[in-house]
Image: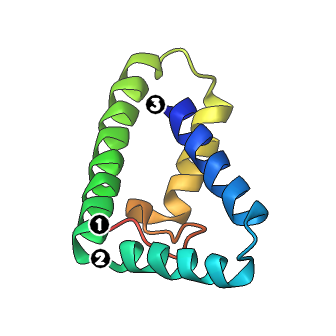
Amino acid sequence: MRYRLTFVAGLVLGYVLGTRAGRERYEQLKKSARQVAQNPAVRNTAETAAHQGRHIAGRAYHVVSVKVQDHVPESVTQRVRSLRDRHPNGAVEDDWGTSNT
């Protein structure tokens, strides 16, 4: 699926860059993409997917930490604890300006 998306993205990019309509067509495509991104259904779906991803990652973290806690050197354990204490409950903004809510 990833390869198909990459291929389609390449086709779109090639079309936009190679089209004779140039800037006008680019602005039209940009406007359409913005409308899709601002659609409440799309935003809700993306938010739900992000929430589920964080939930699954949290469960995976717990399972892995329980299984490997005896095998990790104490220095690594202390470093992880210090990082966790710096940002309690993971309340940190990511690079996209969203929080882990």
Q: Viewer-proximal residue, 40 or 84?
A: 40
Q: Residues within 10 Å of mark 2 (few under 14, many from 20)?
A: few
Q: Is 22 rendered above or below residue 50?
A: below
Q: CA distance from mark 2 to mark 1?
A: 5 Å
Q: Which residue is mark 1?
A: 42
Mark-to-mark CA distance, 2 and 3: 24 Å
What secondary structure is found at the residue carrying circle 2? loop
Please say if the residues under marks 1 and 3 sit with CB atoms less than 8 Å apart.
no
Tell me: residue 69, above or below residue 96.
above
Query: Mark 2 near mark 3, Cβ–Cβ under 8 Å?
Result: no
Residue 23 place in picture, x, y as percent: 73, 82
Give the x, y percent position of residue 19. 73, 66
Spot the residue most to the front: 20
Which label belongs to residue 39? 2
* Residue occupying image coordinates x 56% and y 70%: 96
Q: Position of residue 43 (x, y in %)?
A: 31, 70
| Quadrant of the rendering where the C terminus is positioned | bottom left
Viewer-proximal residue, 30 or 24?
A: 24
Judge whether 88 appears above or below 65 on screen. below
Q: Secondary structure at mark 3?
A: loop
Q: CA distance from mark 1 to mark 3?
A: 19 Å
Query: Left of 14 or right of it: where is 83?
Result: left
Image mark count: 3
Residue 21 falls in image quadrant: bottom right
Cβ atoms at labels 2 and 1 below 8 Å apart: yes
